[in-house]
Amino acid sequence: MFSPLIKRGAFVLEGLNAFSTTIYFNYIFFHMRDQFGFTNLGNLSLCAISGAVYCVTVWLAGKFAQRRGYFVALRLGFLVMGLAMFVGSGFLGRVVQTLTSQIILLILWTLGMSFTWPALEAITSEGEPPVRLQKAIGIYNVVWSTAGAASYFIGGALYERLGTSSIFLVPGAIHIVQFLILRVLEQTPKTSISNQLIHSETHTGDNPNKQTNPPSTLAKVFLQMAWIANPFAYIAMNALIPVIPRLAERFGLGPMIAGFFCSTWLFARSASFVALWLWRGWHYRFHWLIGSYLAMSVCFLAILLGKSLLLLFLAQLVFGFAVGLIYYSSLYYSMDVGETKGEHGGFHEAAIGAGIFAGPAVGALSLRFFPSQPNLNAWAVAVLLLGGAAWILSLRPRIKPTRPPNG
């Protein structure tokens, strides 16, 4: 059980992590377009490489954090990411701006990031009973999503006004700040008497806000469905993010305006986290999960194939709310059902990595083998999303009613 001070510090680290990783990972695709002439095919392939690395390493990193400690994992992650960013910027000496060097730096940065998210998720949820787990995960989701949305919003302006080095130097400086904050938190007592009292009070029968857990079999089915839905949500998101530079060109938007306009879905996702944090009615409700999944799939196509900025804006709003509920479901059920928070956080993130790989990979393969069909990547991913919906629906009949027995 971590003290409130450490929990608050973890939220600060989380927000900084979201801000820094969003700048680099989203605007590296603009850099690759401008520096190496990357088209959608190149950027989708690059994103797939990062996803494949993350899928494997984050699962192992979650196990590492569970065994060696969350602070150790965070320290390693911040150091590796910071090193990659400063090398990429040329701050530590002249960096060779070749395609190979950029891919190596992306892989190194992805490896470092793998050690951060499972540990931050675990610190947030460690020792929290169901009533307070809802609040803790709500704060966690609002913090990282809002920081990420703000980062994307201003990232285009940084890229356009300060140049390419900004997408390396700004994250690198943030990682130094994170490392220093972590050193302070490591000197802080992990538990406190007040925290233990609150913990015990939350478990008493007199607590009016006590939340009743669903049957374990039902909870595990929802966890399974969420672990299926979330990678497919990341398939959609990461089949979209690498092609935003070309999407912006189609509408005549520069990096700065693209950052302002195309951050709409990120802010919508953040708003959904606030709503889902304050309202618990979506917990263990199948129609909310499948409805969000279907809405996400339709809006994915609308964003990539829409002919007007108004349609793009509206589709982003719905898309953001939909992926928000799917992500929240995966993380909440992972932490609600699982006891080993670091390992479950690692599996949750590994599923995200699978989505980051699969969506861009399918899009890239479609463009590679059918270059004359520029929109085929959108339709190919849509078919993949349809398969995910069928998979989730196949689990629906197994869910038992939660009504209490008669008599």
Image: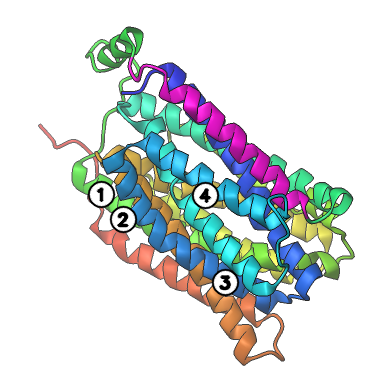
Residue farthest along the left direction in this orientation: 407
> What kind of residue is marked 3?
Pro
From mark 1 to mark 4, how far is it between C-alphas? 35 Å
Q: Is residue 158 left or right of residue 102?
A: right
Q: Is residue 85 left or right of residue 279?
A: right
Residue 222 in the image: state x and y as whole percent.
32, 50
Q: How many marks?
A: 4
| Residue 122, placed above or below residue 278 | below
At numbered mark 1, what does the secondary structure look like: helix, strand or loop?
A: helix
Q: Is residue 175 magenta?
A: yes
Viewer-nearest residue: 332 or 314: 332
At numbered mark 3, what does the secondary structure look like: helix, strand or loop?
A: helix
The residue depicted at 78 percent of the width and 51 percent of the height is 259
What residue is shown with label 3?
Answer: 360
Label 2 CA crowd tier, 10 Å (few <14, some 14–19, many 20+): some
Proximity of marks 1 and 2: CB atoms separated by less than 8 Å: yes
Residue 151 in the image: state x and y as whole percent.
70, 43
What residue is shown with label 2?
Answer: 224
What residue is shown with label 1?
Answer: 220
From mark 1 to mark 2, how far is it between C-alphas? 6 Å
Which of marks 4 and 3 precedes in the sequence? 4
Which of marks 3 and 1 precedes in the sequence? 1
**Predominant SS along the magenta part:** helix
At numbered mark 4, what does the secondary structure look like: helix, strand or loop?
A: helix
What residue is shown with label 4?
Answer: 80
From mark 3 to mark 2, how far is it between C-alphas? 23 Å
Which of marks 2 and 3 precedes in the sequence? 2
> What kind of residue is marked 4?
Val
From mark 3 to mark 4, how far is it between C-alphas? 25 Å
The answer to whether residue 390 shows anywhere in this view is yes
| Residue 150, placed above or below residue 211 | below
Proximity of marks 1 and 4: CB atoms separated by less than 8 Å: no
